[in-house]
C-alpha cells in the first residue's frame, strides 16, 4: 500500500513574536490521541508539548498534561513550532524551548503550571 502525501500551499501560522530569536530542537510528534479533521490528523503550531523528550530524545512528544493539585504539575517542555501532520503515524517536528511566543496565535493559552515549567519561553500577547 503506498501513501500519497498531499501538499497544501498557503501561509503557515507564525507563533514567534520575534522569528529571529529562538531555539528549537527536533522532535518526533506522537499521533496517539490526535483526532482526524477532514481526513487529516494535524497537531497545530503553538501546541504546548511534553513527554520526556528533553531527557530522552527517543521519547515522542505529545500534548502536555497538567495535573491539578498543590502545586500543579505538568510535563510541558516546549511549544510546537509548526503544524505537524501525523495522519500516517508519528512525524518529525520542531519544539521551541527558548524564545518569545505570540500567545494570541496559540490554539490554547498556557496555564500557570505550563508557564512556570517553560522558564525560557516568554509569552507575549
Image (cartoon, grey):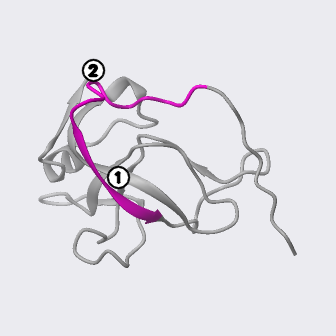
The magenta-colored residue range is: 11-28
Image position of 114 (left or right of 6): left
Provide residue 34's location: percent of width, then percent of height.
60, 59
How crowded is the residue under tag 2: few (<14 C-alpha within 10 Å), some, or many (20+)?
few
* Placement of the N terminus among the 4 image quadrants: bottom right
Q: Are marks 1 and 2 in contact (CB under 8 Å)?
A: no
Disc 2 element:
loop
Number of numbered discs visible in the structure rendering: 2
Say whether residue 72 is left or right of residue 89.
left
Image location of residue 69, percent across then percent down: 20, 60
Q: Which mark is residue 125?
A: 2
What is the quadrant of residue 122 in the picture?
A: top left
- Residue depth check, mark 1 versus mark 2: number of the one nearer the observer: 1
Residue 63 on image: x %, y %: 43, 57
Quarter containing the C terminus? top left
Magenta-drawn stretch, dominant element (helix, strand or loop)? loop
Relative to the observer, which residue lies in front, 68 or 50? 50
108 relative to 96, above or below: above
**Residue 120, percent from left and from top:** 13, 45
Q: CA distance from mark 1 to mark 2?
A: 20 Å
Residue 115: quadrant of the picture: top left
Residue at 41% across, 37% down: 108
Query: Which residue is label 1 attached to?
Result: 95
Label 1 sits on a secondary structure element that is strand
Q: Is residue 99 magenta?
A: no
Amino acid at each position: 500500500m503506498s501513501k500519497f502525501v498531499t501538499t497544501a500551499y498557503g501561509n503557515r501560522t507564525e507563533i514567534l513574536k520575534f522569528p529571529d530569536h529562538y531555539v528549537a530542537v527536533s522532535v518526533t510528534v506522537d499521533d496517539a490521541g490526535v483526532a482526524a479533521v477532514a481526513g487529516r490528523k494535524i497537531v497545530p503550531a503553538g501546541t504546548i508539548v511534553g513527554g520526556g523528550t528533553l531527557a530522552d530524545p527517543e521519547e515522542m512528544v505529545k500534548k502536555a498534561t497538567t495535573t491539578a493539585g498543590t502545586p500543579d504539575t505538568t510535563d510541558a517542555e516546549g511549544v510546537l513550532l509548526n503544524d505537524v501532520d501525523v495522519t500516517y503515524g508519528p512525524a518529525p517536528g520542531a519544539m521551541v524551548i527558548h524564545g518569545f511566543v505570540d500567545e494570541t496565535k496559540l490554539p490554547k493559552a498556557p496555564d500557570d503550571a505550563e508557564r512556570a515549567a517553560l522558564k525560557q519561553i516568554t509569552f507575549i500577547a
